Amino acid sequence: MIGPRVGLFLHERGLTVAAVTGRGRLQTFTLASEDNPASLLRAELTTRRLTPRRARIGLQRSLVTVKALEVPAAVGSSLAQVLRFELERHVPFPPEEMAFDSLTLPTTKGGPLRVLVAACERRTVERVLRLLEEPRLKALSVTVACHNLPALLGRRLKARRAVWAHRHGDAIDVVFLGSGELRLSRTVPAAGGSELAAEIAGSLPLLKWKDCDAVWVSGDEPGPFLSSPALADLGAPVSEPPYRSGVTGLLADLPDADRGVAMLALALALGRRQPLLNLLPEELRPRALTVGQLMTAGVATLTAALGVAALLAQGDVDRHYLDDLDRTTRALGPQVTVVEQIAAELNQKKRLLAAFKTVEESGIRPLSVMRELTELLPQDAWLSTLSLDAKSVEITGQASAASQLIPLLESSPWLDRVEFTSPVTRGRDKEQFRIKAAWETGPAGPAATSAALTPERAAVERPAPQRPATGTARPRSQPPAAEPRPAPAPRPQPEG
């Protein structure tokens, strides 16, 4: 069972409570300022058999500073810091002891950002929250009580710019509404109609209004104000507010003695779920879905329902289609396997061809270099490593006389600047050496020399090797005795 909707109006004379039950019945009572109002509130709720869980709390307008400020439109996410800095000039307490909230007002294109701000002392909010601890109530919101008066109005209002003057006790709360929404509020002493008219006329420039469409009067003894000539001179009809139909019966049950404060408590009880200018700390506010979130959830639910209905309606057709597709897929299975094998072979050949192209483009012919070294080096020379790059060649090995290798390598048409890169060391019967040489024919190295020789010139200028050369530098073997070593070929002259 949903509990009653409860509004608590904290004013200078005490605490006024209005509770609207689920059957549309209204109960109101006022507790005078005592030493322990929390106990009196719990006892009164128990006596009236009211078991609310939550309550909306409203503060007297004089306890809260409400200002319309103008800030640069480009403040963005730092709006709260800018507003806190601006409020320091308008409140009589330090910023760290301030609780405030803001509401963005309609702004002209290209003009500054207009913001309505409400601020009060933090201890005022804390005192109100302590009031709810003993009755075990949870605060839904802490707002200015008169800001909830639009909850009593209908949705369709004829007046675009309206001024609502509500009297309670010795004060009059003046609320300015634009299209039914809060734009500004003020509190003035309860004087005559001329003083009220002067306050209204002086506040219109703050809103940049030239005039208003209606002046509404409610609360304690509204008669003298309804017939005031000064209010009529504002150029707008003076009347009671256009209450919505469901509120008229509740207003009839309000006590005449405290009608002004009871009406504010009723407006709090019927207030919106997400009130404007809520002074309750952010961490204590109840989580509630906004109108946009509710609409999004409704659209998502409707879409899901339509999707399920479509799936159920098309279930048989989709099942037959999937069966046909499955049979076709199974029939194409062997062909797919063959295509995959062909694609795998093609990829392997592409990688092999790319490797060949890489070797060709590198400009180095390792086999030609190894063949040349095989011809140049003596029979007792052994190679352990052979390193090639685009600029030089480096060999490491053993020989009986390592110093004799330098002139032999210098005689090669491919090598130049042959030198030892480390001292020659003597082993058991061999000398260990490390020789480095540069390419004589430029960066292309042996490739350029090989390309410069035609098949006929190569046959004349370079005899075929007598011993095979392998990919790794291995020790040279002794040639057969019946085949003498051919005479050295003449040195090819570099072209150009």
Image (cartoon, rainbow, N blue to C red):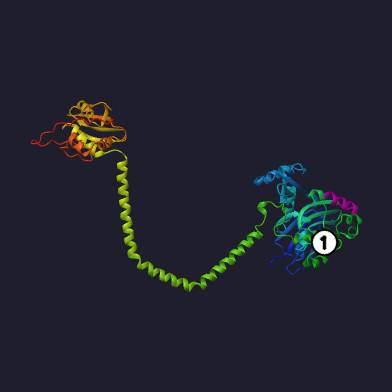
| Nearest to the observer: residue 120 or residue 443 | 443
Q: For the residue marked with disc 1, what is the amino acid?
A: Pro
At 77% from the left edge and 48% from the top edge, which residue is drawn? 67
Q: Is residue 124 above or below residue 333?
A: above
> x%, y% of residue 214?
83, 58
Q: Quadrant of residue 160?
A: bottom right
Q: Dominant secondary structure of the magenta stretch?
A: helix
Q: Quadrant of residue 443?
A: top left
| Nearest to the observer: residue 281 or residue 242 | 242
Q: Which residues are magenta?
A: 189-203
Q: Which residue is mark 1?
A: 241
Mark 1 element type? loop
338 displayed left or right of 37: left
> x%, y% of residue 12?
82, 53
Q: Quadrant of the N terminus?
A: bottom right
> x%, y% of residue 194?
90, 52
Q: Is residue 199 on the magenta stretch?
A: yes
| Circle 1 crowding by C-alpha within 10 Å: few under 14, some 14–19, many from 20 | many
At 76% from the left edge and 43% from the top edge, which residue is drawn? 93
Q: Quadrant of the C terminus?
A: top left
Q: Quadrant of residue 146?
A: bottom right
